Amino acid sequence: MSKFFLEKYSTLDAYVPGEQPQDRKYLKLNTNESPYPPSLKVLDAAFKEASRLNLYSDPESKALTDALASSFGVGPENVLVTNGSDEALNFAFMAFCDSIVFPAVTYGFYPVIANLNGIPYREIPVTSDFRINVDDYIGIGDNIVIANPNAPTGICLSVSDIERIVAGNSGNIVIIDEAYVDFGAESVVPLTKKYDNLIVTQTFSKSRSLAGARLGFATASEELINDMKTIKDSINPYNVNRMTMAAGMAALADSEYYIANCREIEETRVYTVYALEDLGFEILPSKANFVFAKNPKISGGDLYRKLKDAGVLVRYFDKPGLTDFVRITIGTRSQMDTLIEKISEVLS
Ligand SMILES: *Cc1c(COP(=O)(O)O)cnc(C)c1O
């Protein structure tokens, strides 16, 4: 820390992303990326747009906003396109939250953006089987953010459970982070038409194979979207670059390719769960493109290190209550066969 770093940031505990090591070739199952490359139409669209990179991108992301609105059945005034959905979350925290609550086991970025923006937060414990108890969130008089499916558990809430939370906190903002919703859960985007306190965020990073492009969006009432735009235009009006916008449009137009990949990942998830259970693992019921798994024979930390030595990266959380587990991204069937082979070797 330099002597110039402001005092107010001195206690910032920055988010530590999953490793992206460059030292050797790993089988990367640690950051929930898609194992499938973007479709050829997406590559083509991004390449064509590259010749216009001398010009600023559209600060309103109009074409992509319109395409998202029609694909989700909302109006363009209900959509804000962002640089990854982390940016949408940050805008929502900044615009609406002078305090916030979230589950004690969830996405590690929430406390980080709360701290960055000086927002006090409270964590609500999950049950002993890592579930969110909906009743804990009714009428709590505070803003709420919930990932659905949750991370790193993969457990999801039903639409009616989420509706109870949104309806039960009408004087506060409820943010539902649907980063993993395309792998078998149900979206609550349609509820944004009924509730003026609901914000839903989604990303192109996981189900649409565009983690490296940085593209996400928020849907909400026109009023909430306008407030978030004010924040966006005060930080980075050209928040989404031209190639990403073109890639996003093409990805939306090529949705069959992505839907097929998601179904494949869901099947591979089932296959992986059975194979891991055969090896003595306990696995939380996941509707995401990862599983959260523990084995009584080995701690999460040991398994993580031994797999890393064997060339396979999984995610380990050195946090009370989570140290028995590793989070494993679902890759292709053959990648999961490699994983299972390496785990068997480690365990024997
Ligand atoms: C990956 C992830 C995000 C957002 O990722 P972006 O790449 O910024 O879109 C948001 N929430 C959760 C729970 C995630 O796992």
Image: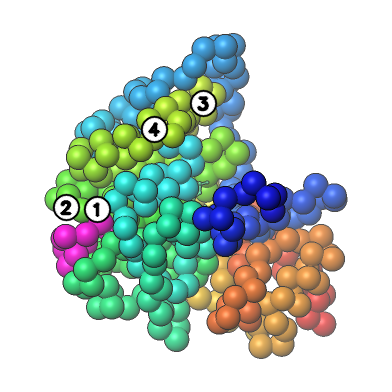
Q: Is residue 173 magenta?
A: yes
Q: Which mark is residue 195?
A: 2
Give residue 331's quadrant in the image: bottom right
The yes-or-no answer for disc 3 within 8 Å of ligand 1 is no
One can see residue 64 in this view: no
Give the amino acid type for the residue marked by disc 3 in the picture.
Asn
Q: Tell me if mark 3 has few (under 14), some (14-19) or many (20+) residues whose alpha carbon lies within 10 angstroms of its own.
A: some
Where residue 340 appears, as percent x and y from the top left, is 72, 69
Q: Which one is closest to the eye, mark 1 or mark 4? A: 4
Q: Which mark is residue 198?
A: 1
Where residue 140 appears, as percent x and y from the top left, is 23, 72
Q: Residue at x 36, y 24 (%)?
A: 60
Asked whether the beta carbons under mark 1 and mark 2 sit within 8 Å of each other, the answer is yes
- Secondary structure, mark 2, is loop
Q: Earlier in the sequence, mark 3 or mark 4?
A: 4
Residue designated by label 3: 241
Q: Main secondary structure of the magenta part?
A: loop
Where residue 297 appears, as percent x and y from the top left, is 71, 87
Q: Earlier in the sequence, mark 4 or mark 2?
A: 2
Distance between the alpha carbons at the discs numbered 1 and 4: 23 Å
Q: Which residues are magenta?
A: 166-174
Distance between the alpha carbons at the discs numbered 3 and 4: 17 Å
Where residue 68 appears, as percent x and y from the top left, is 34, 34
- Secondary structure, mark 3, is loop
